[in-house]
Every structure is written in C-alpha cells, then in structure tokens.
Image (tube, coloured by chain):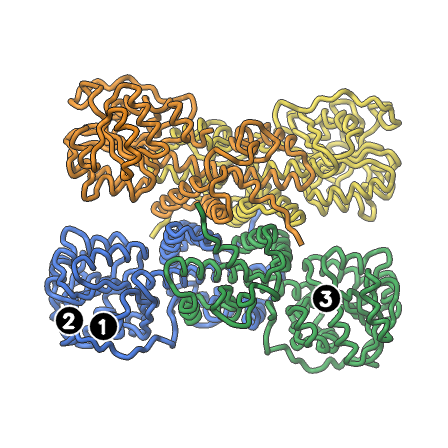
Chain colours: A blue, B green, C yellow, D orange
Amino acid sequence: MTPGSPGRASRRRAPHLAVCSRSMASKTPVGFIGLGNMGNPMAKNLMKHGYPLIIYDVFPDACKEFQDAGEQVVSCPADVAEKADRIITMLPTSINAIEAYSGANGILKKVKKGSLLIDSSTIDPAVSKELAKEVEKMGAVFMDAPVSGGVGAARSRNLTFMVGGVEDEFAAAQELLGCMGSNVVYCGAVGTGQAAKICNNMLLAISMIGTAEAMNLGIRLGLDPKLLAKILNMSSGRCWSSDTYNPVPGVMDGVPSANNYQGGFGATLMAKDLGLAQDSATNTKSPILLGSLAHQIYRMMCAKGYSKKDFSSVFQFLREEETF
Amino acid sequence: MTPGSPGRASRRRAPHLAVCSRSMASKTPVGFIGLGNMGNPMAKNLMKHGYPLIIYDVFPDACKEFQDAGEQVVSCPADVAEKADRIITMLPTSINAIEAYSGANGILKKVKKGSLLIDSSTIDPAVSKELAKEVEKMGAVFMDAPVSGGVGAARSRNLTFMVGGVEDEFAAAQELLGCMGSNVVYCGAVGTGQAAKICNNMLLAISMIGTAEAMNLGIRLGLDPKLLAKILNMSSGRCWSSDTYNPVPGVMDGVPSANNYQGGFGATLMAKDLGLAQDSATNTKSPILLGSLAHQIYRMMCAKGYSKKDFSSVFQFLREEETF
Amino acid sequence: MTPGSPGRASRRRAPHLAVCSRSMASKTPVGFIGLGNMGNPMAKNLMKHGYPLIIYDVFPDACKEFQDAGEQVVSCPADVAEKADRIITMLPTSINAIEAYSGANGILKKVKKGSLLIDSSTIDPAVSKELAKEVEKMGAVFMDAPVSGGVGAARSRNLTFMVGGVEDEFAAAQELLGCMGSNVVYCGAVGTGQAAKICNNMLLAISMIGTAEAMNLGIRLGLDPKLLAKILNMSSGRCWSSDTYNPVPGVMDGVPSANNYQGGFGATLMAKDLGLAQDSATNTKSPILLGSLAHQIYRMMCAKGYSKKDFSSVFQFLREEETF
Amino acid sequence: MTPGSPGRASRRRAPHLAVCSRSMASKTPVGFIGLGNMGNPMAKNLMKHGYPLIIYDVFPDACKEFQDAGEQVVSCPADVAEKADRIITMLPTSINAIEAYSGANGILKKVKKGSLLIDSSTIDPAVSKELAKEVEKMGAVFMDAPVSGGVGAARSRNLTFMVGGVEDEFAAAQELLGCMGSNVVYCGAVGTGQAAKICNNMLLAISMIGTAEAMNLGIRLGLDPKLLAKILNMSSGRCWSSDTYNPVPGVMDGVPSANNYQGGFGATLMAKDLGLAQDSATNTKSPILLGSLAHQIYRMMCAKGYSKKDFSSVFQFLREEETF
C-alpha cells in the first residue's frame, strides 16, 4: 500500500559522467542517520547492495542490529560526516533534521568538501532550502529526497523518491536511492522533492475525504455502494481514492477498508503531511481552502481515536449516524 | 467534454419481455416537454429514430422548429399526457418540474393509466420521489433519468443517463433513452438516478478544487506545472481533474484551461448541482464538510465574474497573487 | 437560558386602532395547534390571560390536559379554523406546518375571511412566504413569529417573538403574543421573522465555535482560561458566547458548561437551525462560508454523541487530545 | 480603532520592590530596535517620558529623525545591547526578530547580564520561547509584549500590551510599556502575550466574517440592515463586530464601513495574524476549523484587491451579486 507513490514511469537518465572523487569507488562507506521504522529497512537494502555503512541513531538500541552485522556505529552525526562522504538522513521531523545537520555535534561540524548529503525525511521545504544553504557554505551538496510508500515498500525496495537539488548531482543520488526504491524522480531545485510529496498528499487527502463524503451521501440516498463506486469510476468523479483504495468496506478487496482500516497510511501521518502543506501554503501565501479543512478533519480524527487507523477510515468517521 | 459522464460500460440488459399496451407498437407518439438547450437536440434524436413527437414548452418559440418539421405542438403538459403515453421532461429546476407534473394544467391532470413518465431534469431526489408517488397514484410509472454530458454530447447522442425507478420498467425507458445517449445506467429505486449524478458531481467539484490548490501550491513552491501533473498522475493524487481535465493552462491540450476556460461545464451549473447536493445532505443529515465548502467556493466564483467560465477556472480564481 | 433572544428593547407601538370584527371582543376563542414541549406552556399562558382555546394536536394525549381544564378539543386543523378566527401554530418542521395549513384537513379548508393565522414554528422563510400566499388567497392574514428562548422561557412568559407580516396587523398579533412572551419585535414583511431568527442563530453558532477554538488554542499555548476569557471580553474578540455563555468549564457559573453541558440549547436544535440557514442561503445564492462549516460541525457533533448536550459543548468536542 | 485592544481593566500591581542594578536609576538609556510605522511613535513616547534612547534600524533613514533630536544611533543590535540594559524591539516578522537577537551582530552578542529585553513584535509564540531560552542562557531576561491598537493608538499612547514572562519582572516591564500604552496586561509565562493576542485576533476574524455573512444573508432575505443589527445586538448573536465595528455601510457612523473601508486594521495584517494562529494551532495540534477557514478567506481577499482595506471589508467581498 503506497499512498503518494508515483508508479511505473520513473525517470531513467543516462548515468552522470563527470567523475568526482566521492563516486569513483562506488562501494566506499555510506553514512546513515535515523534507523527507525523506515530507516532500518532502507539501510538494510543499502547493505544488500554491498555498501559498508557508518551508522548513527539517537537511540543506541536502533543501531545494535547493524553493529551485530558488522557495520560501524558512531556516537554523533559529526562522526558520521568524518568517516563518510555520502550520507542519507531519515528523520521524523524538521526539528530532528535541523539538529542532525546544524546541532552541536551535527554533520556540518565535520562534513568534508564535496560530500553528498541526501535527506529523505519529510519536512518543510523551507527547512530543506535552509539546510541546503548551510551545506553549500561548507562546499558540500544537499538534496531533499522524501519517499512515498510505507514500511512494506521500504522492505521490498519499492519506495519512490522525489528528489530536489542540483540536476548535475542527480545521477549520484540515484545510484544510492535506486538501491532502496524502484522509482527515483527528479523534481527540480532543492525543496521541490518535498514540494511534490506535499502537494500529492494534500490532493490525496482531499480526494479521499471527498470520496468518503460522496459515498456516504449516496448510500444514505439509497444507492448500493458497489454500484455507486462503479458509476464514479467510469465518470468524472473518478480518483485513486475511489478506484484503487476505496474507503467503503465491501467495495474492494485487499485495501484497509476491507480489514477494519488496519495497516496502510495512518491518519496521524496524513495529519503531519497536511501540517507541512499548511505551513508551506502560509509561507507562500497560497490559498488552500479544501487543504486547510482536510488538515483540520485529520486533526480531529486523531483526537477521536482514529490516529492509528488508515487514513481512509475518514469514511467511518463521517458515517456515524445521528442518534436522538 | 462531459463532466459526470460514466464511460463505456453501460448496463446492457436483456430486453424486457412483458408486453404492455404502451410499448406494443414502438413508434407510437412520444411526448416531450422542455425544448431548451439540452431538450432541443435530445428531441431531435428521438425524431431521427422515427418517433412522432407531441411537443410542449412554456416558450412557444422553442416549439416552432418542431412544428415546422411536422411534429404536433400542444398548449400545456396536460394535453401532452392526453395524446402520448410515454413522456420525457427536460426542465431546468425542481420548481419547473413540479409545475409540469402537478400544476393546474400539468401532466397529472390527464395522464393515462400505464403511461411511462421519464424526467431527465437534474433536481432534488426528494422531489423526484414526491413526483413518483403522485404519478403512481394515477396508475402510471415515473422514472428519474438525469443526464451527464453537455449540449455537444446531446447533439452527438453521447449523453449518459442515470436511471432510477422500478427495475421492471428499465427496459422500456432504455428503448427511448438509448436513442438520445450512449450510456443508460440503472441505479436503483426512484431518486437514485439523481443521487448518482449529484454524488459524482460533488466529488468532481471537490477533486477539481483540490487539484487547483495542489497545482497552485506546487507552482509557488517552484515545481514545473507539467512535471507536477505528471507526478500526481502516477501517484495517489491522481484524479479525472488532474489527468483528463487539468485546470492549469499549458499542461494539457483540448481542455477548457487551454482555451481561456471557454466552453465546458460552467461554474454556475456546478454551483447549482452543489446546491442540490447540499439540500440532499441536509435532508439526510449526512456530513459533507468539503462538499459544503466546495459549494461556497463556486457560489463566490459566480459572484466574482466566473459564472460562465468552465468550472476548472477555479485555478485562475485561486492563483491570483497578493499585491501590496 | 435563551439563545437568540433579543433583550429589553422590544418594539412598543401604539395600539392598532382600526376595529375589525375579529378583535372587537378580545376574549373570543383562540385556536392553538401543536401542544408539544413549547406549545404546551405557551397555550397555558394564553389561558391564564383568559382566552378560551380551541385545541388540536396530532397526538391526542397532548390535548388531554387542556380538555380536563375545560378547553375545547377538535379533531383536525380545519375544525380549529371553523371555530376560531385567531390561530397560533407551533410545529417542529416545515413539513408539519405545510400539513397543518394545506393538508387534506388543514386550516385552509375552513378558514374564515379576516382570520389571523400566526405561525410560531421555526421553518424555512420561503415556506412561510408560500403559506402566506395561500392564506391571502382565502382572504385571511398570515404572520410568521418564531420564538427565541427555550421551555423555561416559555413557562415564565419570557419568550421573544420575531414577527414578519403586514405591519397593520402587528398590533393584533402583539395582543396575543404579548401574553406568551416579554418581547415582540416587528421585523418586516412575511418571512423576515424567520430570517431574523435564522441569521441570529447562525452568527451565534459561528461565534460559539470560534470562542471554543480560541479558548482551546489559548489553553494549549499556556494561558489560564479565566484570564483569557477576561482578556477577550475587554477586547475585540468579545461576544455573547465569550462573555455570557462561556463554553469552557470553570470560567463562569450558571451556564451549561458549568453543569456538564446539561440543559440549554441542544446541539440538535442548533443543527436544525443551521440547516434552515443553509437552505435560505442556497435559495438566495448568499455565500456563507463559516455558516456552512458551522452547520457541518454541529452535524458531526450530533453523530458523535453530543446531540442532547448544550450547543456550547463544541468546546468539549474540539478539546479532546490526540493520543498516539 | 483598535482591534484586539483590551479595554479599561489593565492589571495594576504594586511596584516591584526588589532593587536590581538596571532599574535603580530609572532614566538610564533604553535601547530601541525597529523604528517603523509603529516603532517610531512608540519610541517618541519614551523620549517624552525622559528616557535617553539608543537607536537602531536596518534602514538608516528611519533613525535620522531621532539622531536630529539628539538620540544616539548605533550600527547594529549588538551595539544597542552594549550601551543599554533595557531594550525594546518592534519588528515586522519572526525572521526579523530572530535576526535582531541571534544574528551575527545580534543583541545576544553583547547583551549584559541582568538586561531586560522586551519584544513587542507580533510573532509566533514558539519563536518567543526560543528567544527567551537563548536570552536566559546569557543571564538576561526576555519578555514578549505584543501590542494591540494601530498607528493612531501608538501616537496617542493608547496601545494595549499583552505581556508574557517571569512575573517578578512584570513591574519593570510595566514601567517602560506604561509610557507607550494605556493598558499593560500580564498574561503568564513567556509566549502567553503572543498567545493572547493571536487568540483574540482569531476570534475577532471569525466573528467579523460571521457578522458579514449573517448581515448579508438577512439583507437578501428582506431585512433592513439597521433593524437586523439592532436585533442581533440585543440577542445571542451580539459581538464586537456587530455592535462596535459593524461591517455594513449605513449601519454605524465612525467606523471603516462608513468610510469605504479606509483606515482601520488592514486585511493583510489580519491575514498575517491568522497565519500565526494557524502555525500555533498546527504546532499544538489544536483543531481550528473556523480559524483555518477565516485565514484562507483573508488570504483570498488579499489576492483580490482588499489587502489595504480594513478587515471589515469582508462584507463587501461576500456581498457581490451573482450575475448571469
């Protein structure tokens, strides 16, 4: 289940020819910071491709498995930067990313000139740009490369990466990201990887809630849910949420709505991404009327016991009947 | 361009075998009430299929063309009902439909037992149910069969009809509707044709505004519009509004956004359909948070000069830059 | 507790001098249709002022108490109209009002010329206008006079009536309404009584939700609720919901928030009034962005167990914490 | 005209007795950073009370007037901190405040132990807390003290200050702030000054839009605007926006709606404050459904030519009629 994941058509480009010291020997160590639910399987896929790792996580326990497998664990991001000139960061929030880069023992304290720093965290694009500036001052390169796809996709190497940064460095990033995902899409300047992810997930949230509202209204007006879904899907109401991930139990198999909204993409994560969309919209003075309201709806769902359910459970949230 | 039009998969059923007086001789006259922009080409398609027509419109001028072609024009809906036992009504609002059926000279004054009355107006499903009850009391049959597709589709016989009513009568309705459209979909009991149309168009409005917001935000965050559309379309944000009818000028050819939002499906019509969705939701106590807000947005657009532009012009409405 | 109740400044006008047959003997019988929670105490206050009553309710049990007290109970609205030339109706919905006036045994079947028909139900102003037209055709007079104030205010004769109709008849209406309420406000043509009530309650709902959001946000940002209420109340955020009916427990005494949101004005009733506002706005093409959203919020509250709580419980609805 | 301004009841406390070096001689120099539209008259009021000033602004021209008057102008915030142990900052955005405090030549580079730093900018309370932490590390004291009231109130010493910070230092802050405003309200810990202002202005925006919607709907339903305002103001819909600052032209004198929405509190400033409310709500996971939508509405108004009009012009924005 991979909300937000661009499909088949990844961008395949000719390999980048400019030889730079860092990529000459492609199996030099790669740094990896953030070994959580997502970072863990991603790092393992790098290992499977033969890259020695330099590992750091604020929770030492998260590193143990890698240490046992013979990888090198260090005690702070700065030490990762001292030992590796290509580093992947995979962190939960903007604040964690800032700390890992600019903190007292952050990457920037010891980063080598020419290093390639790829941040796969989903954070505010304005923060990505800020980090890129600081990295550039040190003579290194920063790219934002948020993923779409969940833990399952991370394990099966099916993630999609949306990459922002200098185009000349895209091939170098692709070499590593291609070991962890099946699609690596170049989006433009630094921050546009984040932007693409945020815009997609905002539209996803809106069309999911819209699908839930339309299905619920139709059912109350006497339509059979399967028939209504069929009509929508051959009409102009068609969307991914109606034809691939329908939120109404009984309409489709193999989706969270068929399994009591277990698994999938949690309402909390959707609320977080909508918070980023909100911040970006406020910063750029872009009106997002439905996006804002979608954000508030997921916010409320999180407060009413839906935080761990798949985000398609908004149908369940809306359908409850009035009682008198 | 046919917002709301279910595609290829129309419902093909075995012809209805029960012989009833009305359909014995299939080319007996058919009544047609409401010869406006849509009714005019629809009635002409019935003529082309060899059906003699009994015509009525509140504006006598609308009938002239048919009179010249040899069809019979009468002076009120009741007179139509006296001369035809199959009648199509195609009227702009609930109030017009109520007048045509229950008014002082309405159909019900002279309707014959066993008549088939098909209302193709887009109106409140609660009104359709009300009319059906009154028709039934007179021993006749009522079906709601709103269309999707615009004037062009009406001319080229490409309309889709979403039909609500007794299933046993569907084949009889299909015989006539099939002369005017390429898809005739059975939706369930009376009112469900309206319900299906309303639900589809509400979801369409929501995903169109969502697409406009996401595209606008992405552009302000530095993404190329064509690239962003491509990413959305291979991802979970994909919808009819993003992949078939993209609202951003320059992204697609042959859609209203490529032609200054001329043609297509006007913002006023979308506002009207959202008003019906709102009414239905209020009546059934169904929460439609995004649907309500979408309604208000089209309402405002109509007040700000967008009433005659295609409904995808919401992108233009949102994109205007703040000036200081 | 009387949401919606205009205070002291009722409109005091000189008594209407034109002598018409109906008011000559002021203590001729008055008809009363609808003896529910509100109608019951209202009718009793008329009795206390010495008016003999002609009573009807669809539920015969509702009439028993009045029959025992010697009032005359009849078997349909038409019979009320036969025996009384001044009639008060107090019914729960538009549909009930239409039935009582225009139904098979409705008032209009036997209404006498010159009768004064006062509808105190809260219904769609468009329905009030429709009824007024039909009443006028029969040579009688219709006024809409919805109340604000609840059951307590009805008992203590503290209701406010907002009256729409021909100004010349206002004094005649005031004679009766003044027996049941302390404020009788003339609002303009037929339907404006409903309009005033609907507009007030919509603004009330909006400012109540706004107060709940602002108080909740302030508390989460570290402000003491009492201090925040005090600051708002001396500032431009001040409103009836913040200074007279504060929704946060512990801020004020003697309001529903101090008593677990018992009593007061139920969320269901607010949802109903917002539904009427929505209908009126759709009919008049008036944008009500916040009003629509407020409607949806109360709709959801009703579905989530808040239907019988006071409408200020929206604070409780919003404040629930996200859990992970 | 002072949206957001707490009135009469300022908090009067006994003077703070603890003698600290900084306040011994009360007329030691005070630093002032940010001499814009608001800062200029505020600084002049400090001068009138006999305080020598140490001045800095990024635009040297803004300082000229003070230099000519004999005040000392320095070349960076650090130099202000070197020469004054009480400093007021009055800056337009969070970014400017961060720069003034933590920038390369910021206050923190040369701040003396025990200094009192008062920030009167309206910024994100989370930023205020961050600055407070850094200031505290240097052994100095930080308070947030945003104002309500506009340029006129600044000139006439009628501002209201909402103050957050250590309570023991409030009296010291009050000594200076009382020279520039008539109300100085203690709100609690650092950041609560900002919180109070943001919450008030969010509620103000919501009730203003609600008033505009209710007035507009009522007018379209046939009510006289003055009568409707009167009814609301004696009812539960009453709020500051309806009774003190009514947005409908012709209802009140001496308010922006009586003067083509000139003067007052610009829509741009309201949009900015709602952006801060949005950020704070996202950070604290507080649902603000109406607050978010109000933000988006002011955002749109700014894009449609209302940026410099008073924020009550939302009535004009909504009232435009649909044309066909």
The quarter of the picture where the C terminus of chain D appears is: bottom right
Q: Position of residue D193 (x, y in %)?
A: 33, 33
Image height of A147 relative to C201, above or below: below
Q: Are marks 1 and 2 in contact (CB under 8 Å)?
A: yes
Q: Position of residue D145 (x, y in %)?
A: 32, 31
How many residues crowd mark 3 within 10 Å: few (<14), some (14–19), many (20+)?
A: few
Q: Name which quarter of the figure residue C59 lies in.
A: top right
**In the image, is B224 to the left or to the right of D97?**
right
Q: Looking at the image, which residue is at 71% across and 29% down? A: C186
Residue receiving disc 3: B37
Residue receiving disc 2: A22
* Farthest residue, direction front: D68
SS of the residue at dot 1?
helix
Q: Looking at the image, which residue is at 82% across and 71% down? A: B65
Q: Is residue B26 visible?
A: yes
Identify the amino acid type marked 2: Arg
Residue receiving disc 1: A172
Q: Looking at the image, which residue is at 46% across and 71% down? A: A244
Identify the amino acid type marked 3: Asn
Give me the C-alpha separation between circle 1 and circle 2: 9 Å
Identify the amino acid type marked 1: Ala
**In the image, is C209 to the left or to the right of B162?**
left
How many residues crowd mark 1 within 10 Å: few (<14), some (14–19), many (20+)?
A: many
> Of residues A292 and B185, which is closer to you in this image?
A292
User: What's the chain of the residue with tag 3?
Assistant: B
Q: Are marks 2 and 3 in contact (CB under 8 Å)?
A: no
Q: Tally the marks.
A: 3
How many residues crowd mark 2 within 10 Å: few (<14), some (14–19), many (20+)?
A: some
Q: Name which quarter of the figure residue B280 lies in.
A: bottom right
